[in-house]
Amino acid sequence: MASTKVNKHGITDMQQAFADEYIVNPQNATQAAIKAGYAPTTARSKASQLLTKVNVQKYIKERQKELEDAKIADQKEVLQFWSAGLRGERHEQVVVSTPDGAEVVDNELSEKDKLKNSELLAKATGMFIDRHEITNTQPIIIASVDISDDEQIEVNDDESNDS
């Protein structure tokens, strides 16, 4: 008989094995149950039951998120990638024609590629700051007095009185 001891995820080891198999192939829950160790004769109904259990659903969602997050590069990884390119630590494979045919050669990144890596790294770390000069032709009023609805503030626009 299978162990009914609950693991740190709130499910049994057999339920976790099912969930892990189901994550790999979500189109066939019955096969996931069989691979997890459930009897082939009851695998279909057991898979259906397992997919309705809250803790099994929670485990499946958490694992799918972990797997998805692992596929996406984080900021540190991208910065390290650009830094490695800038320093010449990365290489690219190039196919070169030889008298015997073609050969794949490991080449250092070109100066153009290193420059692009340095540019992207500098932009990402704020080394390049775009500065824009803004000129305002309208008057700016800074007032710290309360003005009632009946009062009006008169603004003289010197540029418009030049006629």
Image (tube, grey):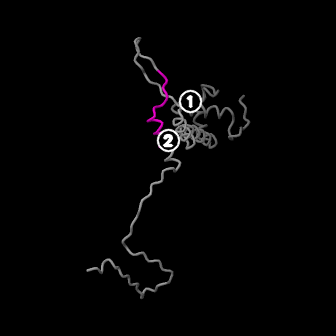
Q: Is residue 138 above or below residue 62?
A: below
Most foreground residue, 54 or 77: 77
Residue 53 % position (x, y)? 62, 41
Quadrant location of the N terminus? top right
In-image side of 2 versus 50 (left or right):
right
Question: Image point 57% across, 31% down: which residue?
Answer: 44
Q: Residue at x 48, y 36 (%)?
A: 114
* Among the two numbered marks 2 and 1 on one chain, the one whose residue lies closer to the N terminus: 1
Using the rendered view, name the quadrant where residue 101 is placed. top left
Q: Residue at x 61, y 37 (%)?
A: 50
**Could you tell me how far apart the alpha carbons at marks 2 and 1 are, in whole angstroms?**
52 Å
Q: Are marks 2 and 1 in contact (CB under 8 Å)?
A: no
Secondary structure at badge 2 equals: helix
Say which of 153 and 112 sits in front: 112
Mark linked to residue 118 = 2
Q: Which of the numbered marks, if any, corresponds to residue 30?
A: 1
Q: Residue furthest top?
A: 100
